[in-house]
Amino acid sequence: MRRLGPWVRLGGAVAILAVLGWRLGAEAFLDGLRAVDGRAVAAALGVGAVTTVACAWRWCLIARRLGLPLTLGTAVADYYRGLLLNAVLPAGVLGDVHRAVSHGRQVGDVGRGVRAVVFERAAGQVVLVAVGMAVLISGNVPVEVPGWGLSALALVLLAACGSAKVRRAARTTWADARTGLVNLDVLPKVTLLSVAVLGGHVALFVVAARAAGVQAPLTRLVPLVVLALLVMAVPLNVGGFGPREAFLAVAFGAAGLGAAQGLATGVVYGVLALVGSLPGAITLFRPSPQRQVRPERPDQGREHVPALVG
């Protein structure tokens, strides 16, 4: 069953896309592809650079508090590579797995390297969940969410916090969590960086919507975008495509913005997200760095934590 899991998720994503194509027609997908122009590509590269540097910085802060050497330049390059692998490989997390294991091997502590990436990604997901809950509670969603829909979104919010394996790992490594993340020295910085990353994702979604021809005001558009980002946590996708497009088609249709435009927005966002990760192709051919020496006692004060420099 474990081996069948990825194929089941892949099949589910294909089924979602097939239903969307059947109901809305292939033209809606093609409209999304045709809507990608030079300005949208430039925006994707710019927003992608800002969010990637912020994510890499967040990773540096946590890794260094755990005593793992990591320069900002190396973190940015590895993060770009991870984003590209996430976009082109099944499951959508293999790039993060490669980033975690590769860094752990370089510093001689795979377990702690993996936990650094888990904490880094979890921090971003917690901020997204908090904002998503605020959107739902505020009642600013321009569509009526039925009771079963709220239940489904609650499950998505829980899924966004990480898998069962991630939660078990966090429980069994609470000492590392307190050292690397849950403390007054790191947590405020990581939270601010996570807010900046979320803002970048929302901005890219708005660019995608405008490119797809959606002229709705931001007050109507942004709540739907935040919920779409939450839905993207559902592990059913083909290159990132699947539940996001289904949610946007339904939500845009219910909000009077047009189901076809919702689907086109999702397609444009997927293409732009891939474009934003393309600098990672350069890092695929970069020679592997030599193994670094990790401090023997990383939890002994701040003298073991290097300054954040590239």
Image: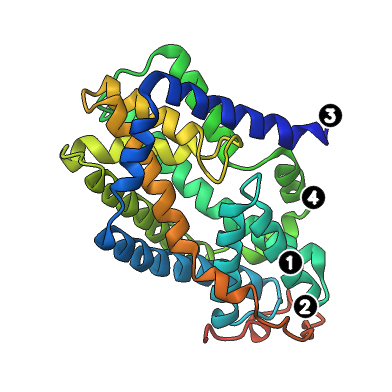
Q: Which residue is mark 1?
A: 113
Asked if the residue under mark 1 is in contact with the one under mark 4, i.e. CB atoms within 8 Å, the reply is: no
Q: Quadrant of residue 42?
A: bottom left
Q: Residue at x 80, y 73 (%)?
A: 105
- Give percent across and percent down for residue 18: 51, 25
Residue type at mark 3? Met
Element class at badge 2: helix
Circle 1/circle 2 CB separation < 8 Å? yes
For disc 2, the marked residue is: 106
- Separation (CA) of disc 4 from disc 3: 26 Å
Q: Nearer the viewer, mark 1 or mark 2?
A: 2
Residue 172 is labelled as 4
Residue pictured at 55% horizontal, 69% vertical:
280
Q: Marks 4 and 1, Cα distance to the nearest angstrom?
A: 15 Å
Q: Quadrant of residue 234?
A: top right
Residue drawn at point x = 35 percent, y = 63 percent: 47
